[in-house]
Amino acid sequence: MTLNILFAAAQADWPDYETPLRDALKTEGLDADLRTSFAPELVDYMVYAPSSEVKDFAPYTRLKAVLNLWAGVEGVTGNETLNVPLARMVDPGLTQGMVEWVTGHVLRHHLGMDAHIVNLDHSWHHCAPPLAQDRPVTILGYGALGAACGEMLRSLGFPVTGWSRRPGDAPGIRRLHGADGLIQALETAEILVLLLPLTGDTENLLDATSLARLPKGAVLVNPGRGALIDDGALIDALTSGQISHATLDVFRTEPLPKEHAFWSLPNVTVTPHVASETRPRTAARTIAENIRRAEDGQPLKHLVDRARGY
């Protein structure tokens, strides 16, 4: 039987995804009709992004699963009309992009590269940075992305602490969990990387109290979610010197409004949500494999726990 698969994302993305998705579905041996429009009652699977016009899933009575194009699912997990399995995007291209961005910015701050790149007075500051082994890095959110970044940083010699809500093990990585573990993770973080999902428990996790627990002069790197941080508290910490620099890729409102204080602070770097983009070719393979698994009666990979929100 032919599977009807609806591409329910921004129409501007359709030209980039159409051929990779068709090729991947064919490679998985699936007889599929992939379109941007179907009568709702005919749809078997939905390739979805929260930017889609689809907000009410109730008319999709034949729907078997929703395959999210993005790693973040906070824009859809609370939708009470969605009553079928939801899979988030975890694919090699997305992971590699995050590893490259995080590693690049951690090394940038560790080596103090900004002082050499922007040196308008041609000053000669002969001051070598410590070795990586003497610069503790903490990653809050030690899932697939956090672990991939942690392993790369560990391979460069950084002592890495990974924190998550639940316990876990990783060779060569200091693993902490829970409320007490969070305090320990913050207290040693000269560079702090945020890779947590956005849930009711993680919103504003980096508030004035949390920021005060960091070593004075710590660096904050956030490619996770903007609302993990209390903006006002971060601005205060940057102004006082408690945080020496913040490199931010995600924000509560995107694009970041031109009047936002982050633009004018000299110790803030704004990047335009580019840390980890979904790459159509690798994402298409992940989606097609998941649909094939579902059709074979196997569990979906990267299934979202709706109660936890990720």
Image (cartoon, grey):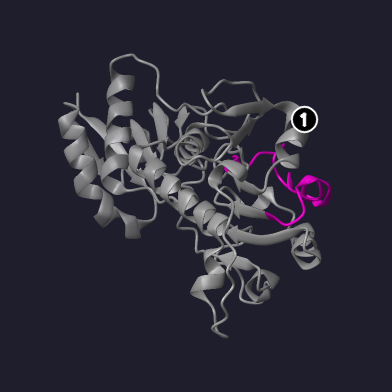
Instruction: Work out whether residue 279 or residue 108 is closer to the camera in this orientation and state it.
Output: 108
Other residues around mark 1 within 10 Å, as few (<14) / some (14–19) / many (≥20): few
Instruction: Work out whether residue 102 or residue 58 is closer to the camera in this orientation and state it.
Output: 102
Name the spot of residue 113 as percent of width and height, x first: 52, 65
Tell me if 307 is positioned left or right of 101 in this view.
right
Tell me if 287 is positioned left or right of 196 in this view.
left
Magenta-colored span: 195-218
Tell me if 18 is positioned left or right of 48 in this view.
left
Instruction: Work out whether residue 152 or residue 273 is closer to the camera in this orientation and state it.
Output: 152
Secondary structure of the magenta portion, mostly?
A: loop
Q: Which residue type carries mark 1?
A: Ala
Rendered view: 126 above or below 133:
below
Kindly state the secondary structure of the residue where label 1 is placed.
Answer: helix
Name the spot of residue 249 as percent of width and height, x first: 54, 58
| Picture quadrant where residue 263 is located | bottom right
| Picture quadrant where residue 20 is located | top left
Residue at 61% across / 62% down in the picture? 253
Name the spot of residue 52 as percent of width and height, x first: 44, 51
| Residue 36 in view here | no
Q: In which quarter of the image is the N terminus?
A: top left
Rendered view: 207 above or below 249:
above
Residue that badge 1 annotates? 179
Tell me if 173 is positioned left or right of 149 in this view.
right
Residue at 63% across / 29% down in the picture? 308
Q: Does the magenta stretch include residue 207?
A: yes
Q: Quadrant of the C terminus?
A: top right
